[in-house]
Amino acid sequence: MASTSQWEGEWNVALVSAEPVSSATDLTTLIPAYSPLLYRVAHSILRNPAEAEDVVQDVFLRVLEHQHQLPAIRDLRVWLVRIAWNLALDRRRRIRPDQLDQPFADALLSTAVPADQALADARHIAAVFRQIDRLPKPERNALLLSAIDELSIAEISAVLHRTESAVRALIFRARTRLRQRLEKGNPS
């Protein structure tokens, strides 16, 4: 579990953002509105559906714990993504990497593909995951968040506490490094 100061930092990020949350925010509307996005954020890190679902539930527990402070949050979406991101990272640290990749790779494969092709595809996907995991942490984080189509560069920069130009540079470097490693088959 994260320290109190880490969660306070998340509150501060939301407090300086753009759009205020209505004081009449209905918590029952937040769940269907934000669950798919939060699930994708958690799943991009954890690569495990059950773990990602647990993170989404934990996010909404945090919302309930802090519901009296919701009117002070200016950008609820960024605040929720930041909480999901941090919870998923905390959970990822407690799970062995091989526990995550195989179920995720299996879920991506089509059952209509011949077994030998499915095995080759699974190995390729696992190699991509290994290379993503080997990227420098700032590049990996920016790349994973950029893969979630709904997040703008501005939102990613708020989640990562970086400038927009720094986020663009991190994404560019991560994609370039990943492409080079995969083309060469070079693990370094």
Image (cartoon, rainbow, N blue to C red):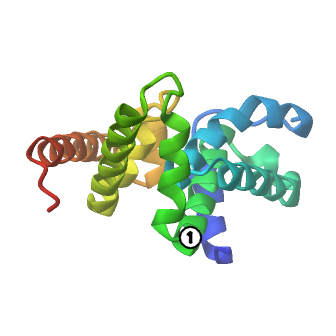
Residue at x-position 70% and y-position 52%: 50
Indicate the position of residue 108 as horizontal and vertical percent values.
Answer: 50, 35
Q: How many marks?
A: 1
Q: Find residue 8 and report its image quarter.
A: bottom right
Nearest the viewer among 124 and 175 is 124
- Residue 92: where, in percent of width, then height? 54, 65
At x 47% / y 54%, what residue is drawn?
101
Label 1 belongs to which residue?
A: 95
Of residues 118 and 17, the one nearer the viewer is 118
Whether residue 16 is visible here, answered yes or no, is no
Residue at 81 percent of width and 35 percent of height: 30
Image position of 144 (left or right of 41): left
Q: Position of residue 127 (x, y in %)?
A: 30, 50
- Looking at the image, can residue 95 be seen? yes
Relative placement, left or right, of 60 versus 52 is right
Q: Quadrant of the C terminus?
A: bottom left
In what element is the residue under mark 1? loop
Q: Is residue 112 left or right of residue 164?
A: right
Quadrant of the rendering where the N terminus is positioned: bottom right
Q: Amino acid at mark 1?
A: Ile
What residue sits 65% from the left and 77% below the top?
A: 3
Residue closest to the far bottom: 3
Residue 74: give x, y in percent of width and height. Answer: 67, 41
Report which quarter residue 87 is drawn in: bottom right
Tell whether 166 sits left or right of 113.
left
Relative depth, front residue between 148 and 161: 148
Q: Is residue 155 above or below residue 150?
A: below
